[in-house]
Amino acid sequence: MADIEVKKRSERYRGRITQIPIYIGKCFRMFVYQSDWKVIPLASFIAMIVAVVVRKSFYVTMEGTTKGALALMSVALWNGFFNSIQVVCRERSIIKREHRSGMHISSYIFAHMVYQLFICVIQTVTTLLVFMYMDVKFPSDGVVSDYFLLDMFVTLLLVTYSADMLSLFLSSIVKSTTAAMTIMPLVLMVQLIFSGCMFSLPKGIKPLSNFMISNHATACICAEANYNSLPSSSGWNMLKKMSQRDDADPKIKSMVAEMELTGQDEIIKIETAKSNFDKDYESTYINVKYHWRFMFAMSFIFAGLSVVALEFIDKDKR
Amino acid sequence: MIASFFSTFSAGWFITNVMLIIGLWKIFKKCKKPGWWAFIPAFREYQLAKCANRENEGRMYLLIVALTYVLGFVTKIIGGMDTKFVDDHIFGMTLLLGVLMTIYIANLVYSIRIFSGVFLLFGVSKRWMWLVILLGSFFPSFLLGVKKKYQPLFIYIDPLDNEGAALSGLKAEAMESGLTVNIEERTAMDFFKKRYLLRDIHLNIEPGHMVLLLGGSGAGKTTFVNAVNGYEKAKAEIILNGSSIYDDYGKMKYKIGFVPQIDLMRGNDSVLRTLLDSAKLRLPADMHASQRRERAEEALKFFGLEPVKDRLCDKLSGGQRKRLSIAMEYIANPDLFILDEPDSGLDGVMARELMEGLRKIADRGKIVIVITHSPDRVIDLFDDVIVLAKDSKLTGRLTYFGPIDEAKKFFERDKMEKIVLRINREEEGGEGLADVFIEKYAEVCHG
């Protein structure tokens, strides 16, 4: 080799932190120009449908609350999934080019985390406003704070945001929007199955539900709704149905009528509720915080995994 | 449990396996391969796929067969256990069943793929596939191997077994300014085998030169470009204006502008915004915003994008997008510009305009390397040409580097496209003279 001394350059280029604003700016431009804003009206539309269905029994009985929690969790999960499922895979080639030009993947993902938080906050507020407008009855006291709505806001935000980060991760590992949209219903289905309030899971599978956002989300919503102190109507409703049959035993008919007259049906509802007691839904500060912490941690884990997955983007074939 | 495991080795199993071994032994002999491969399960299918020039399918099949054996063994063991164990591990069992089903389907699919190649090899009807589907692979293998009337129509020789062109023993002397490329080798592991993607490429490009990178498909143009700009490191020394790209890649990458074939930009950003963001990413952090804007304005002017600076990228024409894509790199004022087919999708007039723009960049003392598949319409704009070709070992080799006119004399052809035909492999419609010209070029360099 000739006697040329190899020079060292001294220029400093933008690092991880200073690159973040560039990508936050890009994200918000996407919100305005690429129809990303449509996720907001979509969220309110879904919330409206759910509110119509659950408003009569939500926070009134155990059964209604479980169904409501499932519906509310599904809304938040759906919103979160839809926010991010395509954001990375649709511009994968652009990311590859920019990574080659000095873009830090961590800056890119962090910018998305900030932007998605903004979207999730708006969606959560919208959902709660729609529920209030639709006259869904909420308890007045919160478990963690003094205000139920504040607790519910934090819960729904964490559910939406952790689902959002999960879909950001999925979007980072798949190579096309088609693959992303194929995988999304599958993940959503798994989340719903493992939510803990749709099916009673076999012993061997149950531990898996501890790692599901949906499971922590429903537990959190039920805990905030004071689930264990609500009456359970399932036993009484069954008895009442039996008595309303034409061929029902007259003794049962008269017993049910008498119980209704004397107000003993409430005792039945409370006693049934006692047998439906669920430790996971305990309305305690510790319990709610535990679920919050899980969802908060999951958000960061999925964001971290997205960074790791995208660091391999250079290996993509042409 | 042990008894149930050994029950697998029934008389039927024995007969079909013996038929398979005999059939494959004979097929391998016909294809001039060692017959003993027929005794090694999984690897024999891989060898069969290689005979039929279906190596990729063979690799996959090898893995699938290996997995089938492992999972089959596990299933046998589980089958011998009591039902309580299965009930207690229902999730794992369901998962295992799912995996087994997938593996068996993949096994069938890949054997169909391999045997479609085998049937082509022996020139028999595709209807033979029904034998594979209904009876398994042993029967067609036995027939094709034992019957003398079935002879292979071709003998597949792995290019990796070829010698390839001789190494030049050259080395480029590093220059104070300009680009020095000394690529010893760029390799990749290909199914436990070391494969040379590029080898023995040595050249010096002076500043202000616009260089055409020429070569047929798979000659290693993109691999070369990626090795030069440090994106995929090779066993090489690449010096740009006295600085080693590999040793100081973190900084040097900002001195290299790479423009990909596809215009990769966000459609919802305006042209000016795209350039300003590019400037933020590619220019030193301490550069003032006003200076960055100045650079962006200059780039807009240079590439004729001023009238559309506020337009969204999605609304630009093909030519405008291409120019913007180049401007995104130009804004950082790189010393080395590499463009991968910048004229693809452009008509002759637009392509010429674009190349003239690149010539202007080169005239400013930059090195511009361009890959294009339509070089002859703009050949007068280039100073030099790098010709890459696959040698008989399928390694990307330097066939020529130097001025355009001398290249025409060297290859005895008047057009660049004809030069490519001269070095392309015969099965690609070329003359298959790559090895000859690689060695001739080395001789010329040695004087």
Image (tube, coloured by chain):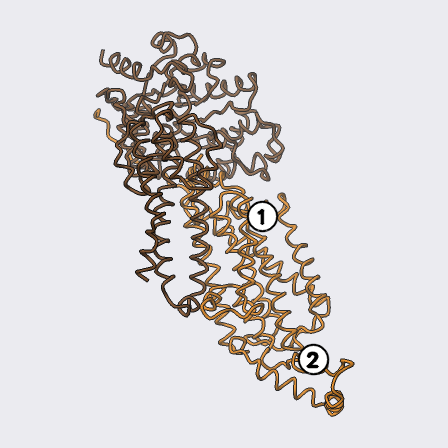
Chain colours: A orange, B brown
Q: Residues within 10 Å of mark 2 (few under 14, many from 20)?
A: few
Residue furthest out toward the front: B11
| Residue occupied by mark 2 | A237
Chain of the residue that carries numbered disc 1 in the rendered image = A
Q: What's the amino acid at mark 1?
A: Phe
Chain of the residue that carries numbered disc 2 in the rendered image = A
Dividing the picture into quadrants, the one containing residue B306 is: top right
Measure how far apart labels 1 and 2 are at the Cα level: 51 Å
Q: Earlier in the sequence, mark 1 or mark 2?
A: 1
Q: What's the amino acid at mark 2?
A: Asn
Percent from the top left, x then y, of residue A84?
Answer: 55, 51
| Residue occupied by mark 1 | A28
Quarter of the image containing the N terminus of chain B?
Answer: bottom left
Q: Does residue B206 appear to the left or right of A26 in the view shown? A: left
Q: Does residue B257 appear to the left or right of B73 in the view shown? A: right
Q: Is residue A283 above or below residue B391?
A: below
For the residues carrying marks 1 and 2, which lies nearer the camera in this image? Answer: 2
